Image (spheres, coloured by chain):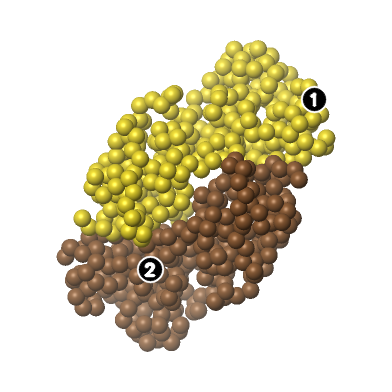
Chain colours: A brown, B yellow
Amino acid sequence: MFKFRHPVPIGSAFASRVEIKAAGLNRHLMAGIDYDKDAPAKSIVISGGYKDDVDEGDRIIYTGQGGQSAPGSGIQVKDQELIKGNKSLVESYLTQTPVMVIRGARGNKNFSPIEGYRYDGIYLVTNHWFDQSISGPLVVRFELIRIPDERTVGSFESESKYFVGNPLGIAPRGNLNPNRGLFGIYAGVKRDPAVPAWIKKVYKDRCQICGTTIRTPSSTYSEGSHIQPLGKPHNGPDTTSNMLCLCPNCHVMFDEGSYYLKKDIVTAVNLIENVETELEIHNQHQISEEVVAHHRLHVAGVIS
Amino acid sequence: MFKFRHPVPIGSAFASRVEIKAAGLNRHLMAGIDYDKDAPAKSIVISGGYKDDVDEGDRIIYTGQGGQSAPGSGIQVKDQELIKGNKSLVESYLTQTPVMVIRGARGNKNFSPIEGYRYDGIYLVTNHWFDQSISGPLVVRFELIRIPDERTVGSFESESKYFVGNPLGIAPRGNLNPNRGLFGIYAGVKRDPAVPAWIKKVYKDRCQICGTTIRTPSSTYSEGSHIQPLGKPHNGPDTTSNMLCLCPNCHVMFDEGSYYLKKDIVTAVNLIENVETELEIHNQHQISEEVVAHHRLHVAGVIS
């Protein structure tokens, strides 16, 4: 299971951005958002730079970067765009990857350190939108909600592409018998976020059935679809050999049995249109015959 | 909000199927599943007819109908299919429409009445799959989970096409200011199930942007997509004038701002491909200019 490793204990204090950098929390000395190209944001620093930022402690409204007359001027002369740090925070939202938050003394007095900076743990980006600034051009805003610290140990669920090593790495082992339980009135299963993360990365968000890649303004999008479902009565394994990279449309149809895979694994049959298509399978992706047979019989209702 | 009206109080007793029929619970005298064509199941009777049925009180595994050598023989000579009553229970699953459950004396002793029949309230179909019977042919199985009675008053959330009058009916009023709150760490909004139900019915599950209709073995599928999002900071109304009928792929892209609608409302612009398409709009479906303008500015980031 995913376990977030805090680089320093939550609550750690720092005198300056130089110390924050040295601690591995944020590599910049001015900019708030630290990120790698095409990856979710690593951390943000909130230090009162944007007067429209809102800090309620457990909930933050954070303004994106770019478009000001000069850094920190507060005067927008150009629209902010979903590029660079802003793109990375959208990616954090889409992949539900936690972001580390560092607060500086110039922020909201109720939640900020008296002096210097403090590491305040991890937050989820739960929303993003555009607003028009007073000067006219657009700014991007992000809502972040604190992940309580106890949830960061062992039980945090997230489907990030970025929990796996770079650039592609070997397939994560996953879990042959994931933890199943009843949550509320629905059955649920603890999933390993590294499994869909690896699959989506291997296929670059391209649907293995129809070839579609969903494009969003800042990124691409796909879903990791279990072949033998995880829940009862199927009890499928949570492994890459039991997963396809699908677009949302093919995901609905595959789960409802509109498609099944033949014994050769590579042939996808659309039961409704009676059409066969060839599945795109990456040479590092092994699909299990057993889970394909289970899906064919128990989901699609095909005896063969 | 949806409020389920029980035809008789939960726990009501009946001496025979004739009495059950008279009470409006189930119109058959033998068959278990009562349904109307192309609609979710209305009710099921569990009375020990299928030895593979499982009754745990709050959870039921129910075997579908058809394919037996004679009704009640227990010998499968043909595959069960997703037609008739079985199709109606899949529709209950896809639309999350509650099903009334009546238990007869011949079922599991722990949960069945000593004699006659008893109305046991409503259940959700939470899963369906195929199994191979001992005789060989396939049977369909359904998992049903009890909806606690307190959830049936005022707060039950469901996206059924069938809560609205037949055949199409006037658009439901919805809610200009739906109830918003924090549930866990996520913000949530109480939605009126009649709103997406009406939209999906009007468009017959056909995507207004790309024209796709997702086809499943027993039915069709689409999603009701709010134009101005319901949650904070957007606070959109939960009304049909703020909703589009979209396929899951276009839903993801519309929510992420890959598409926006021009002032004429009918022109959908794909910002990434820079392509315009004409939205299919039914003559009974009024879309609000205001919500379209909100989505264009705050979701797609387009000032115009």
Instruction: Residue B241: tell me if it is visible.
Output: yes
- A28 on left or right of B138: left
Q: In the rendering, at what x and y percent does residue A301 appear?
A: 69, 41
Which label is found at residue A261?
Answer: none
Report how many numbered discs are placed on residues in the image.
Answer: 2
- A34 on left or right of B288: right
Chain under callout 1: B
- Residue at the right extreme of this rendering: B135
Residue at 48 percent of width and 34 percent of height: B160
Which label is found at residue A87?
Answer: 2
Residue at 28 percent of width and 53 percent of height: B296
Q: In the rendering, at what x and y percent does residue B105 appear?
A: 74, 22
Residue at 70 percent of width and 28 percent of height: B65
Picture layout, residue A77 above or below residue B34: below
Instruction: Please name which of the two marks, 2 or 1, marks the residue nearer to the observer.
Output: 1
| Along the line of sight, the residue nearer the viewer: A90 or A151 | A90
Chain under callout 2: A
Image quarter where the N terminus of chain B lies is top left
- B293 on left or right of B213: left
Picture layout, residue A65 above or below residue A250: below
Picture layout, residue A195 above or below residue B4: below
Disc 2 residue type (three-letter): Lys
- A152 on left or right of A263: left
Mark 1: secondary structure: loop
Q: In the rendering, at what x and y percent does residue A58 appear?
A: 40, 62
Mark 2: secondary structure: helix
- What's the CA distance linking mark 2 and mark 1? 62 Å
Instruction: Provide the residue designation for mark 1.
Output: B69
